[in-house]
């Protein structure tokens, strides 16, 4: 029972981390495009989309509102990430040592985190 709970918690960490990486990919891509490609950047999926004229030979880029995270979405994902790491730690803490020996300890959520 404890091993199953632990593996489920680790799976939840992996899924939450994947969702957070998706947000980071979108934000980083946009942060790269804005200063370098702002003149060829379209903004789609809003009431009045911005679709600038792009001269021949220039590639058009787009930001789609459906791919852009809201602050509420970011908060939900961060909350999910915290809960999943905490759940794995909690299950690990209750596991008998003989069960722990067969598994890797849960990842630490504060390892590699930069200070603001």
Image (cartoon, grey):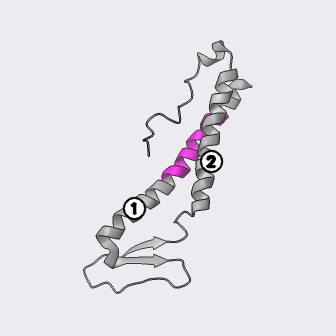
Q: On screen, 24 above or below 81?
A: below
**In this picture, which residue range is highlighted in magenta?**
7-21
Hey, which residue is sitting farthest left in the picture? Answer: 57
The residue to which callout 1 is attached is: 29
Q: Secondary structure at mark 2?
A: helix
The residue to which callout 2 is attached is: 79
Name the image quarter holding residue 59.
bottom left
Is 16 in the magenta? yes
Q: Secondary structure at mark 1?
A: helix
Residue 89 image position (x, y, % from top left):
63, 29
- Between discs 2 and 1, the one toward the N terminus: 1
Side (left or right) of 57 relative to 23: left
Residue 84 image position (x, y, % from top left):
63, 39
Q: Name the residue at 32% across, 78% down.
A: 39
Is 31 in the magenta? no
| Label 2: few (<14), some (14–19) or many (≥20) C-alpha neighbours in 10 Å | few
Q: Name the residue at 50% across, 35% down.
A: 110
Choose between 116 and 57: the one closer to the eye: 116
Q: On screen, 71 above or below 88?
A: below
Residue 112 image position (x, y, % from top left):
43, 36
Choose between 73 and 13: the one closer to the eye: 73
Asked if residue 29 can be seen in this view, the reply is yes
Q: Name the residue at 68% across, 15% down.
A: 96
Foreground disc of the pair 2, 1: 2
Asked if residue 12 can be seen in this view, the reply is no
Residue 46 image position (x, y, % from top left):
54, 79
């Amino acid at each position: 029972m404890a091993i199953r709970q632990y593996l489920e918690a680790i799976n939840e960490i992996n899924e939450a981390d994947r969702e957070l990486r998706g947000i980071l990919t979108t934000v980083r891509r946009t942060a790269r495009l804005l200063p370098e490609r702002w003149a060829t950047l379209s903004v789609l999926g809003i009431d009045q989309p911005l679709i600038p004229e792009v001269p021949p030979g220039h590639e058009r880029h787009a930001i789609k509102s459906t791919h852009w995270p809201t602050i509420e979405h970011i908060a939900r994902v961060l909350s999910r990430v915290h809960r999943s790491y905490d759940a794995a730690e909690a299950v690990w803490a209750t596991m008998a040592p003989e069960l722990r020996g067969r598994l890797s300890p849960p990842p630490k959520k504060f390892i590699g985190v930069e200070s603001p």
